[in-house]
Image (cartoon, rainbow, N blue to C red):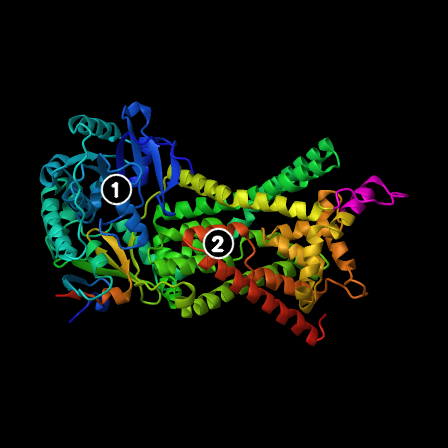
Amino acid sequence: MKTAAKLKFGEKAIINYIDENHPSFRRIIEIGFTPGQEIELLSSSIFNDPLAFSLRGTMIAIRKHEAESIILS
Amino acid sequence: MKEILTENKNLITLVGPPNSGKTTLFNFLSGKNFKTVNYPGSTIEYNSTEFLSKFEIDANLLDSPGIISLIPNSPDEEITVNSLYEHPKFGVPNIVIVTVDSSQVSRHLLLVKQLLESNFNVIIALTMTDILHKKGFTISPTKLEEKIGCKVVKIDGRTGKGVENLAVTIRQILSISDNTKNNLTKLIPSAHAERIIRFYKEIEQIENEVVSEIAAEKNLKNANEQLNKLSQNFINKPDSFTLKLDRILLHKFWGIIFFLLITGTIFTSIFWLALPLMELIDEFFAVMANTASNYLGNNWYGDLIADGIISSVGAVIIFVPQIVILFIILGFLEDTGYLARGAMLIDKPLSKIGLNGRSFVPMLSGFACAIPAMLAARTISNRKERLLTIFIIPLMSCSARLPVYALLIAFLIPKENFLIGGFIFSFIYLFSIISSVVIAGIINKFSRTIIREEDNSSFILELPSYKIPKLKSVVLNTLSSTRQYLKEAGPVIIVFSIVLWVLTYFPNTNPQIDTNNLTETEIVDAIQMERISTSYAAQIGKIIEPVMIPIGMDWRIGVSLISAFVAREVFVSSLALIFRVSGDEETLRDSILNAMRHAKINGTDKNLFTPSTALGLIIFFVFAMQCLSTIAVAKKESGHWRIPLFQILIFSGFAYFATFITVNGLRLFGID
């Protein structure tokens, strides 16, 4: 099961689903990480956390811990 | 706080996701004439105003903090959303205007969908169409209107084109709906996740129909790229300029270099840019006080006005340059889009000590003044992280400590040695940063006792495209922050300065002095000295003397320290007062230093001020919670007395302990 936290730089992927049990679940889908969406890992902070994804025409930075709730197809 | 709005008018509320152009639109609709007021029962602020008269709309206009959804995720958002459904004062809005970034429709229409489902009267203000055009796409407002089911108006954020159309639409709706407000339904959070996903599906379909490519040759390349795309979603990437710039600014190595450079520049310019202005203000108030004193004469009311009132007003205003410079720089950085990147870069280390990337701006602001810094902490949505940020802000070496450090360093290094002085200065700042990090980590460990909040820590932040900042909104924001500082800090400092003045002046209103062979200034000095040594302040000082002796000090420093609890910089002026220092402004510091060198501990020939006590005092000022206005704001921002009381107890207690260790430790090693 590949999560968004495991993407390589510049790698694109489609979101399959979001882990409902993650505490930030609702905020993650509200900001636009929804099933079927394409995301791309654009950059990360020096500590490899947080990660910045391209999503719906903008960049969203989320923590690695949150990226782990984004399951890719 | 005064509300400028009348309650029985129509109400129009402006909402929108962060970075959607809401503030710009608000400025266009209102001019500069807005008031910042608190949300009822909270410390969250919004702007309220009336429409510019040229729009001929007789209604109140409310601004609100950015929200991405009607289901709140933080206490702050909860208040925002609740006020939207039922504002305690103004009721339900007749119209809700939502700003939607055209290049972000798929994300920003979620809020619109939720508002429509809740039965609000919605108008969409479509912003940033120019950015969409740059990406090679265009959007049709009429199609969007048809598909989504509410009015849509295009707004040009740079020229204000379209605002007049928006006004026409508002007037139409107000006349048609006959001012009857809809029955609103609240969204239920439990069944919400599926609904969001369903909304997004619908929005994606709408987006496909209303956004289309600009058929032009220069976009052929763009169009070709479209064919290779993975999903049906077009305009899926941020603009290429942003991506290029981020390759440097978010680079693993260069990113951190630029981060340090940018924060370093902000940090130093707070001091160096502001210094000449601060000196000017200082001189101005000194002249004012002198003039008042000369004009009113040497009596209690003359002294009260000159020393008590004019000087304390000066003590408040002197920090305005620093606050203005800080907020102009931060405003520009925020508008360009860099601040979000800074927060991202620093999130990991800060999360280790229980803070958040978003704590970075408030902490940086804390180096100018803790008050605006605590207000800036409102952007932290997680309550625990926000309270912890507020908790450690007083440890950031604010500018009020500057005069104290400057005096003590000058005492330690007799000759004007700028290099060593500067080195000690940097060391003090570095020391205060490191110790605040350590203390934050410790407080975080005991957060259950002190902060009493458990909250899901998260960092989800949009990194907006880089943009050229808008001068007008930066200036307006700076003005409102400065006003806030004056409003929060001003009254407290002035009132307590007057109380302090009373304590050092009375009860001995007219001491008898042997005036033989004394010049007029010497008589004034002698009277002042006599007053202070028999004043209420001295009596209090003598009570606390047993506490001061273990750290090698006496009641006189005790009184100065007590007065420094009003505001730190008062320490210097009360030393001047107690050690009978006067003379013209240029030599004031020299006279204090001279008096400090000659001061003996009561009844002995031991020096009161020694390298060890001076260093001890520096340590004390690094840690102690000594600012009444900060305490007041910490109480207001955290909602209870818990945080400020712990700050006083922990920081000042630790300051005393650290001073004790420093002074006695140095003496143990033979450094007196």
Residue B606 location (% of width, % of height): 78, 66
Q: Residue at x 67, y 72 (%)?
A: B664
* Mark 1 belongs to chain: B
Examine the structure image and report whether residue B526 is included in the region drawn in magenta. yes
Q: Which label belongs to residue B366?
A: 2
Answer left or right for A28 relative to B572.
left
Q: Residue at x 56, y 49 (%)?
A: B272
Look at the image and tell me in which quarter the N terminus of chain B lies: top left
Residue B359, relative to residue B485: is it above or below? below
Residue B268 location (% of width, % of height): 52, 53
Q: CA distance from mark 1 to mark 2?
A: 35 Å
Examine the structure image and report whether residue B235 is included in the region drawn in magenta. no
Asked if marks 1 and 2 touch (Cβ < 8 Å), the reply is no
Q: Quadrant of residue B139?
A: top left
Disc 1 versus disc 2: nearer the observer: 1
Q: Residue at x 78, y 61 (%)?
A: B600
Q: Residues within 10 Å of mark 2 (few under 14, many from 20)?
A: many
Quickly name the residue at label 1.
B86
Q: Secondary structure at mark 2?
A: loop
Q: Nearer the viewer, residue B75 or B324?
A: B75
The magenta stretch is: B508-528
Q: Amino acid at mark 1?
A: Glu
Look at the image and tell me in which quarter the C terminus of chain B lies: bottom right
Q: Secondary structure at mark 1?
A: loop
